[in-house]
Structure formats: C-alpha cells, structure tokens
Image (cartoon, rainbow, N blue to C red):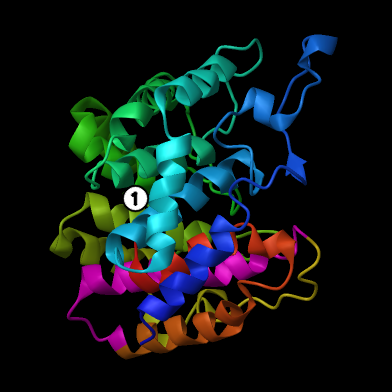
C-alpha cells in the first residue's frame, strides 16, 4: 500500500508553500455591509488570504506544518517554520477574529473551515513553537461556534461537499479530545444520535462535484466514536454487502473529466478522501476479512488521482492536503 515518503512530502510542501501567500485569484466569502467592505482579501484575512479561498489556506497551513513535523530536516520544513514565525502571530490572529465579528459572518465557513482551523491548532500544539498559543483564541472562537450550532442542528448534513457534518466532526473531535472535553462529549453524543441506527447504506454517490463520500465520512466518524467491537457490528449493518464489493460506487474511483473545472476537479479530492476513509476504517476493523478488498480499493483510488495533485490551479491549491490524508491519515 502506498505510503508517504520524504520526497513525496517535500513535493507536497513545495506545492503548497508556493500558494499559501498567493494573493490572487481569491474567492471571498464576504457579505458587503457597505462600500468600505470592498477591500483586498489580505485586509480582511491577514493570515488566510492565499490558496484561492480561506479554508484551503487554513488546511494548506495544516499540511505544511504537519509535514514539517514529520520531516523536520527537509528544506521545506525550515521554510514552513519561517513562514509561521511571520504569519501565525497574535496581531494577525486578531485580524482574523475581527472578521468573525462582522455582521452576517455567523455562518462563515460553517462547518468545514471551522473544523480545519481546529485541526490546524491541534497540529500547531504538537510543535515546539509559539504558533499554537497565537492561534488559540481563533480556535476557541470556532469551538464556541460549534457549541452554539450543533445543538440546533436537528438533522445531520450528509452531502459530499463542504457542508458535510461527519467530516467536520471527525476533525473537530480530535481537537476537542485534547482541548475541550464538553465539545468532545457533544460530538460523541450527536454522532450516536444521528448515525447509530443507520442501516444498509445505498451510497448513491458521487454527485458531480463532491470531494467527500457521505457514506464513508459517516463510517469514519463512527470508527472514532465507537470501540472496535461496536464499530464492527455497526459497520456490518451499515454496509452489509461490503464483502461483495457493494455498493459498487464506494469501491470504484470517480472519473474526472475536466481538471480545469474547479467543481469537477473536486472528484480528485473524492478519490483521495475515500482512500483516507478506507484506510482508517480498515485499521479500525483490523483484523477483518475485508482487508484485501480495502487495500485494493485504496490503491485504485490513489492511482486515479494522486498523479493529478499538481497541474491545474483548480486542484493544485488544495489537493495536496487530501493526498496527505490519504497517505498518512489525520
């Protein structure tokens, strides 16, 4: 099974460092409350104004800092740390916090960007540096938003795009385990309430612009919430024909017809995120008769999209993060 190597890590890091501070093109998530709001992205987002959009910049930072921790001697690691010294500082974090207080910003980046910011803080906390302390107020602000939002989310959001709640809670749960026991307990309770009784998933996916598998994102979350025996029982009921490779959509890589189309290019992310999910699910089930099928499925999905992490900016600004998930997990 393919794994992360230092050469691959260096390539991912070079790719992402090349656009973390790139000012344009940038897709703003902005409600204009007056003409004074029509300002450059960096004025609104002192840190996260590169990589085409806010959330891609956040998880680009997560990616390069994780790679710097895994391979501290590579030259790209030194560059990532130097960039962090310049950018992940209290005065710039204050600017990001100010944006959250704007009228109309309550739903900004909910829940995908929220979760990635928590993942970034969790990664920074694993480093010997000042960056986690600097970013902590922003992480706490997004945690507070999770606390306010989740109790009123009557129904789980099961789409395969940024709004998927299972993906967000998988990332947020890991942060909360170390930093916010109350949020951790809330996530665990909601996952059980929403998903514990799910049976015989039909997996009518993918949609034409999805980068997450609703079925596998849910299964991944449940693999973190339940113990091994409970998860194995849940999974057997959730995908009762998995041993026969059914539903076939979960075992077949998505076809990407046009990688210059930003939405269609999402399907490369789907292949990579499925590889991540299957790897984690397989580890949670191990040992299990499905292991050979899971291993083949991971390799098929990696072969379909790993060669296309670079090439067009519509994928290049974010796919390396999902390739890192696929190769090394979260």
State the quadrant of the N terminus. Answer: bottom left
Q: Compared with residue 327, is residue 188 higher up or lower down, i.e. above or below?
A: above
Where is residue 223 shown, x and y percent of the image? Answer: 27, 58
| Residue shown at the point (51%, 74%) measured from the top left | 250
The verdict on residue 26 being magenta is: no
Residue 241 in view here = no
Left or right: 330, with 287 as reference point: right
Left or right: 277, with 45 as reference point: left
State the quadrant of the C terminus. Answer: bottom left
Q: Label 1, secondary structure: give it.
A: loop
Q: Which quadrant of the structure image shows residue 260?
A: bottom right
From the image, tell me which residue sits under label 1: 197
How many numbered discs, if any? 1
**Mark 1 neighbour class, 10 Å CA radius: few under 14, some 14 to 19, many 20 or more:** few
Q: Nearer the viewer, residue 156 or 144?
A: 144
Q: Which residues are magenta?
A: 262-291
- What secondary structure characterizes most of the magenta part? helix
Left or right: 241, with 33 as reference point: left
| Residue shown at the point (23%, 61%) measured from the top left | 231
Q: Compared with residue 43, is residue 245 higher up or lower down, i.e. above or below?
A: below
Residue 28 in view here = yes
Where is residue 190 shown, x and y percent of the image? Answer: 33, 36
């Amino acid at each position: 099974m393919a794994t992360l190597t230092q050469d691959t890590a260096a390539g991912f890091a070079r790719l992402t460092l090349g656009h973390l501070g790139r000012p344009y093109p940038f897709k703003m998530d902005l409600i204009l409350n007056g003409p004074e709001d029509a300002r450059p992205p960096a004025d609104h987002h002192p840190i996260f104004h590169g990589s085409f959009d806010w959330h891609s910049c956040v998880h680009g930072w997560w990616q390069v800092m994780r790679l710097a921790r895994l391979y501290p001697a590579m030259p790209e690691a030194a560059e990532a740390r130097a960039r962090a010294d310049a950018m992940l500082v209290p005065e710039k974090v204050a600017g990001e916090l100010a944006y959250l207080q704007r009228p109309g910003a309550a739903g900004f980046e909910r829940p995908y960007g929220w979760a990635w910011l928590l993942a970034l803080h969790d990664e920074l906390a694993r480093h010997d540096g000042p960056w986690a302390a600097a970013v902590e107020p922003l992480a706490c602000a997004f945690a507070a938003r999770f606390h306010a939002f989740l109790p009123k989310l009557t129904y789980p959001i099961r789409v395969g795009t940024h709004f998927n709640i299972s993906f967000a809670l998988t990332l947020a749960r890991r942060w909360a385990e170390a930093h916010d026991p109350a949020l951790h307990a809330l996530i665990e309770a909601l996952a059980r309430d929403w998903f514990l009784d799910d049976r015989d998933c039909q997996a009518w996916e993918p949609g034409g612009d999805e980068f997450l598998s609703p079925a596998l994102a849910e299964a991944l979350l449940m693999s973190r919430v339940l113990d091994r025996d409970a998860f194995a029982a849940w999974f057997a009921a959730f995908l009762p024909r998995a041993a026969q490779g059914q539903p076939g959509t979960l075992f077949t890589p998505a076809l990407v017809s046009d990688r210059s189309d930003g939405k269609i290019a999402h399907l490369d992310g789907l292949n990579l995120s499925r590889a991540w999910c299957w790897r984690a699910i397989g580890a949670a089930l191990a040992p299990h008769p499905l292991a050979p099928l899971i291993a083949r499925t991971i390799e098929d999905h990696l072969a379909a999209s790993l060669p296309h992490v670079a090439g067009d900016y519509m994928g290049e600004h974010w796919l390396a993060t999902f390739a890192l998930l696929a190769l090394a997990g979260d």
